Amino acid sequence: MKTFSAKEKDVVKKWFVVDADGKVLGRMAVRIATILTGKHKAIYTPHVDTGDFVIVTNAAKIALTGKKPEQKRYWRYSGYPGGLHSRSFAETIKKRPELVIREAVYGMLPKNKLARIRMRKLKVYPGAEHPHAAQQPAELKI
């Protein structure tokens, strides 16, 4: 018996749309990361991008549990002395709600060369509208 190994040309990529309104950030990010990596498919191969595209709408209406809305902070460092910047969850969700979901999903992907390729297949929009109607995305229940 031989081990199956998917080829890039054999992979059929689907599109899914997720409505983030009222969904818990971590639970939703786990499901999205699974779909981006392709682990939900029988043809999953670790070194080949077998994942699907995911569209997230209503990113501004994401929910957190417990005290996380008050305590969670997002950090970035410029590389210069004194260049550490932090922003609270409330500030981030007002200014750039798509960043909250992108950071959560990126943290759950394997740290390898495919991570950036997989992140390009994640489309996040703060409102209910998205320009990907031509791809006929299927509704993903989380």
Image (spheres, grey):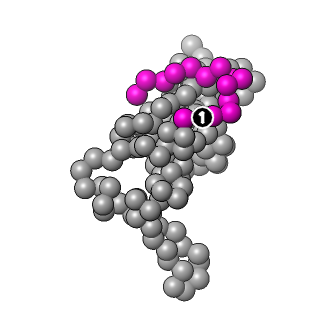
Is 66 placed above or below 7 here? below
Along the line of sight, the residue nearer the viewer: 131 or 30: 131
Along the line of sight, the residue nearer the viewer: 85 or 50: 85
Given the current orientation, which residue lies at the most extreme bottom position? 81
Given the current orientation, which residue lies at the most extreme top position? 1
Helix, strand or loop for disc 1: loop
Mark 1: few, some, or many residues within 10 Å (few <14, many ≥20)?
few
Whether residue 18 is visible to the viewer of this picture, yes or no, is yes
Image quarter in which the C terminus is found:
top left
Q: So how many labels did they put on this image?
A: 1
Looking at the rendering, which quadrant does residue 25 occupy?
Answer: top left
Looking at the rendering, which quadrant does residue 137 occupy?
Answer: top right
Kindly identify the residue that appears in the image at 45 percent across and 67 percent down: 87
Identity, as a three-letter code, of the amino acid under mark 1 = Glu
Location of residue 122 in the rendering, given as x and y in whole percent from the top left corner:
60, 39
User: Is residue 138 shown in magenta?
Assistant: yes
Kindly identify the residue that appears in the image at 50 percent across and 77 percent down: 84
Kindly identify the residue that appears in the image at 61 percent across and 44 percent down: 119
Q: Which residue is mark 1?
A: 129
User: Is residue 68 shown in magenta?
Assistant: no
Is 23 placed above or below 39 here? below
Location of residue 63 in the rendering, given as x and y in whole percent from the top left corner:
36, 44
Given the current orientation, which residue lies at the most extreme right position? 9
Instruction: Tell me the magenta residue range.
Output: 128-142
Location of residue 118 in the rendering, given as x and y in whole percent from the top left corner:
62, 40
Whether residue 13 is visible to the viewer of this picture, yes or no, is no
Kindly identify the residue that appears in the image at 67 percent across and 25 percent down: 133
Image quarter in which the N terminus is found:
top right
Chief secondary structure of the magenta portion: loop
Along the line of sight, the residue nearer the viewer: 85 or 5: 85
Q: For this view, does 126 lie left or right of residue 14?
A: left
